[in-house]
Image (tube, rainbow, N blue to C red):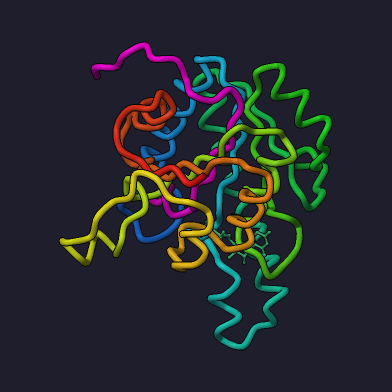
């Protein structure tokens, strides 16, 4: 794959992916080939010396709103969703360590036998040492998705950008999978996203990034090599500042 040697545009970033990207072409769960490919993409970025944290959703396994819609108490359903993110974090950790990337999983809900608890200063130290820190279990609180924890952790880690890996290459005027006339934005303001309700991430996450002046880079995580490419400022993506 042709790639230039343009330097990474940021030094410390957090990548947020939805759990669905782990499904590959399956309707549910984790596709082994997809998670291995994703690990390779992450390894390429780590090799550039960028400090990298990850937040992965749980939608490929369970989302609180789905059972809450069928009469289950929302808070309990959301705790199940948070546990789903821990499963994904462990799967990603396994895939990364298999190819020699050092990782730590830190959970917002302490589960000592499984991973570390979230401790901000310890996470910062891991990043300094070149380890990838995977933040699991969201905020540890119901009534959120993993967007807000991704934003919060990126602010806590002092990241200079939040990367949002999706299945499309940026933010569009309409859903590009349904509307052939949909146009991609190169650049948007936080206010545009909030006022036009563009649904890039939850409003609480956008507002937190706005208040801390952390740019959000929306890009496609589906093609091999694209994460590094976008980090170098190449290819197509949308930046929200
Ligand atoms: N969740 C939560 N609090 C959090 C983060 C996640 O309650 O701080 C629950 C919520 O039920 C959510 C589920 O975990 O639906 C999985 O996360 P998300 O929906 O963000 O997964 P994604 O859509 O990104 O795969």
Q: Position of residue 216 (x, y in %)?
A: 51, 44
User: Which of the 4 quarters of the picture holds residue 233?
Assistant: top left
Quadrant containing the N terminus in the rendered view: top left
Relative side of 47 to 146, left or right: left
**Could you tell me which residue is drawn at 56 percent across and 67 percent down?**
63
**Could you tell me which residue is drawn at 47 percent across and 60 percent down?**
193
Farthest-out residue, left: 180
Residue 180 seen in the current view: yes
Q: Height in image: 164 above or below 96?
A: below
Q: Height in image: 105 above or below 50?
A: below
| 173, 134: nearer the viewer | 173
Farthest-out residue, bottom: 71
User: Which of the 4 quarters of the picture holds residue 220?
Assistant: top left
Q: Position of residue 35 (x, y in %)?
A: 43, 38
| 23, 226: nearer the viewer | 226
117 drawn magenta: no
Q: Position of residue 28 (x, y in %)?
A: 42, 59
Q: Position of residue 16 (x, y in %)?
A: 54, 45
| 103, 6: nearer the viewer | 6
3 drawn magenta: yes
Relative side of 117 to 134, left or right: right
Q: Height in image: 99 above or below 29?
A: above
Residue 86 seen in the current view: no
Ligand 1's image quarter is bottom right
Please state the extent of the stretch shown in magenta in the rendering. 1-23
**Could you tell me which residue is drawn at 74 percent across and 40 percent down?**
156
């Amino acid at each position: 794959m042709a790639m230039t040697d343009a330097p990474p545009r940021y030094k410390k970033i957090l990548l947020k992916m939805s759990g669905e990207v782990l499904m590959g072409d399956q309707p549910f769960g984790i596709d082994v080939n997809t998670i291995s490919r994703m690990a390779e993409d992450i390894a390429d970025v780590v090799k550039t010396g960028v400090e990298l944290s990850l937040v992965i959703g749980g939608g490929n396994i369970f989302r609180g709103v789905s059972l809450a819609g069928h009469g289950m108490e929302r808070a309990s359903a959301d705790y199940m969703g948070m546990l789903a993110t821990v499963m994904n974090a462990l799967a990603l950790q396994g895939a990364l360590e298999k190819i020699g990337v050092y990782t730590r999983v830190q959970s917002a809900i302490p589960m000592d036998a499984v991973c570390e608890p979230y401790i901000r200063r310890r996470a910062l130290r891991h990043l300094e040492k070149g380890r990838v820190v995977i933040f699991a279990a969201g905020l540890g609180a119901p009534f959120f998705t993993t967007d807000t924890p991704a934003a919060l952790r990126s602010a806590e880690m002092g990241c200079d950008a939040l990367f949002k890996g999706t299945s499309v290459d940026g933010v569009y005027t309409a859903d590009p999978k349904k509307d052939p006339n949909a146009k991609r934005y190169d650049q948007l303001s936080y206010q545009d996203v909030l006022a036009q309700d563009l649904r890039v991430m939850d409003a609480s996450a956008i507002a937190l990034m706005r208040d801390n002046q952390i740019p959000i880079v929306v890009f496609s995580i589906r093609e091999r090599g694209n994460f590094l490419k976008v980090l170098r400022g190449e290819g197509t993506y949308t930046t929200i500042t």
